[in-house]
Amino acid sequence: MRCLVEKTEKIEIMDENAGHIYSNLISFNVNPEEVCMGMGIREIKDANHINIQTYVHLTIPHFLRFADAVNKQVSLLVEKGVISKEPEQ
């Protein structure tokens, strides 16, 4: 897979060995040095029970870049009409 970064730098991403995680809940634990993002599955029969599958540790600058990238993707999906920012019913 190839992608463009900053519209000038070409990088190659090798993801053949990447694991896939399915999540319906994300938690954030924040301290002055990092953000720990937990990804898990909320039990259907007991919504108070969550099985965290993995944790992603990000430095604060990397978390800010991650948040910016997510916001840009959400805006793009809204512009294209794929999703709506309307609150769920």
Image: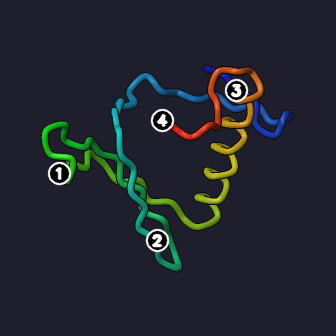
Q: CA distance from mark 2 to mark 4?
A: 30 Å
Q: Earlier in the sequence, mark 1 or mark 4?
A: 1
Write down the residue under mark 2: 30
Against 13, residue 58 (above or below) is below
Against 77, residue 67 (above or below) is below
Write down the residue under mark 3: 3
Write down the residue under mark 1: 49
Amino acid beneath label 1: His
Q: CA distance from mark 2 to mark 3?
A: 30 Å
Which one is in front in this view, the residue at disc 1 or the one at disc 4? 4
Q: Earlier in the sequence, mark 2 or mark 4?
A: 2
Q: Earlier in the sequence, mark 1 or mark 3?
A: 3
Q: Residues within 10 Å of mark 2 (few under 14, many from 20)?
A: some
Which one is in front in this view, the residue at disc 1 or the one at disc 3? 1
Amino acid beneath label 2: Val
Quadrant containing the N terminus is top right
Residue 89: give its label.
4
Report x, y in % for residue 7.
84, 34
Q: CA distance from mark 3 to mark 4?
A: 36 Å
Q: Residue at x 61, y 58 (%)?
A: 62
Report x, y in % for residue 37.
42, 56
Q: CA distance from mark 2 to mark 1?
A: 21 Å
Nearer the observer, 47 or 7: 47
Nearer the observer, 67 or 25: 25
Q: Work out which residue is located at the far right of the displayed protein and give it.
A: 8
Which one is in front in this view, the residue at disc 2 or the one at disc 4? 4
Which one is in front in this view, the residue at disc 2 or the one at disc 1? 1
